[in-house]
Image (cartoon, rainbow, N blue to C red):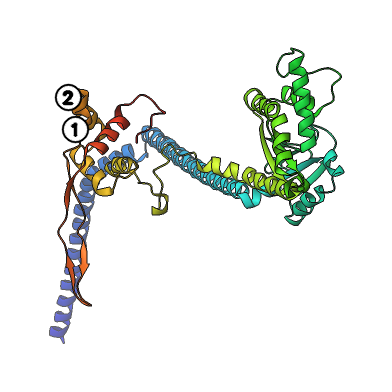
Amino acid sequence: MSAVHRANAWEISDSENDESDDIKASSSSSCVILVQNTSINEPNTSSASARADDGGISADGVQISGRRRRRRREEVLEELETRTAAKERRREEKDKLKQKKLQEQLRRKEAAERLNLLKPENFIKSLTAHIHAVLLQDAGCDVLLRNLDGLQWRNRIENQGLPNSIRWTQQALQTEDEDKNVIEEDQVLMVISHNELEDMVMSHKTVTNQSALIGDMYEGAESLLDHLYKYLTRTAGKVVTILVMISHQQRSGSWDEDDLDLHLSQHHLDTEELLVHLQLYWNVAVHFLFGWQEVTDHVIALTKALSKRPYKALCGDPDLGFCMDGSWSAGVRVDRDGHGLAQVWTRQIQQLNRVSPAMAKAVTSAYPSPSLLLKAYEELPSEEERRRLLADLTVVGGAKERRVGPDLTVVGGAKERRVGPELAGRVHRLLTSQNPHLLLD
């Protein structure tokens, strides 16, 4: 028991010693740890202070970080403003491009509509024929009115202007008010009978015999010739054409040939003098027609010609009329790089009478351009040598085919010949002559 007790006591004492030792060790270790922690915390405080300098923990650090934040905010705002301005510029450019495309489409549409209105079948609907009321006194005028109504062309009866006249006006394009923007055509027809022509001849003869100036009028004269002179003096730029109607009785031959020759011989000189005077001094042409039907045909033909004039003027704008697309126009297309000029030069030689394509090709092959041919002409000393410069050029004709059987064709050789002095002389005159009225043949 004592041993056991002594053992237990030893164990307890031993444990107590261990516990005391452990306590001491723990106390000593805790002290060391505290010392180490204090030694470790010293550099942490320095790093924390450094972070405070950078991160803004200290007072000075807060001011620095605020400046950086404000600078970054200004940069962001400036970048946003730059992006907004660039986006606005792109939007404006896009809107301008869109507006330009819309204007181009509108311009093309208006041009297409205007071109469609200028076509003869549409433009003739805007023409109005103004017929003087004096012409209605002749019963034959009904033929003219019926034909105009049958064609559904606009016509109007008026009692002003040149007596016995027919004139035309056109409605300005794309206008709604028909009473405004009316354009008057320059063509005027004056329809008279044969007896009225004789009165005009007598009036002109009377003025001439009294030593008056050609084209002078008397104040109290009321003849058609005087009305014509006044009208031409008052309205400049008008082209008047006189249509003289010969009655069916005169056409059927109610006069025998001797009486007709005598009648014509008596008035021939006076009538011819009046016609020459009208043509030279007033640019007035005179046509002799038989009856109202021929007058109606003349009016219809002139109306159609007036309807075609704007479209022809529009299509005749290109600088080079021979540079047209399509083989039907017999023209040659010339590109911007000059391709096609050699063919144009060949066509110009081929336009001469009795000049085949082979002969024109022979000339243009020797001298590929007109300037080279002119230079060759200048280098020759005499005129005779210049005229015969092209005479000895060789012309190679096309191959000839000869059929000798149902399935056999023999092709003959090309025939060679010279250009000759006749064509050489015509080409020389074409390029060197200064007379525009010179006949090349």
Residue occupying image coordinates x 79% and y 50%: 145
State the residue position of label 2: 380
Residue 384 as seen in the image, left or right of residue 130: left
Q: Residues within 10 Å of mark 2 (few under 14, many from 20)?
A: few
Point out the residue furthest to the left here.
3
Relative placement, left or right, of 206 versus 434 is right
From this view, report whether residue 440 is shown above or below residue 156: above
Residue drawn at (21%, 42%), measured in percent from left and top? Answer: 419
Q: Quadrant of the C terminus?
A: top left
Q: In 3D space, how far apart are the residues under numbered discs 2 and 1 (Cα atoms)?
A: 9 Å
Q: Residue furthest front?
A: 258
Q: Residue at x 75, y 21 (%)?
A: 205
Whether residue 24 is visible to the viewer of this picture, yes or no, is yes
**Which quadrant would residue 226 be assigned to in this image?**
top right
Query: Which amino acid lies under the numbered mark 2 shown in the image of this protein?
Result: Leu
x and y percent of residue 277 in the render?
66, 24
- Name the residue rendered at 28%, 48% in the picture: 356
* 2 and 1 marks in contact (CB < 8 Å): yes
Q: In screen coordinates, is 147 left or right of 409?
A: right
Type of residue at label 1?
Leu
Q: Nearer the viewer, residue 440 or 40?
A: 440
Residue 374 position within the rendered picture, expressed as x and y whole percent measured from the top left? 24, 28
Name the residue tied to disc 1: 389
Q: Is residue 177 visible?
A: no
Earlier in the chain: of badge 2 and badge 1, it is: 2
Q: Residues within 10 Å of mark 1 (few under 14, many from 20)?
A: many
Which quadrant of the rendered structure holds the N terminus?
A: bottom left
Which numbered marker is on residue 311? none
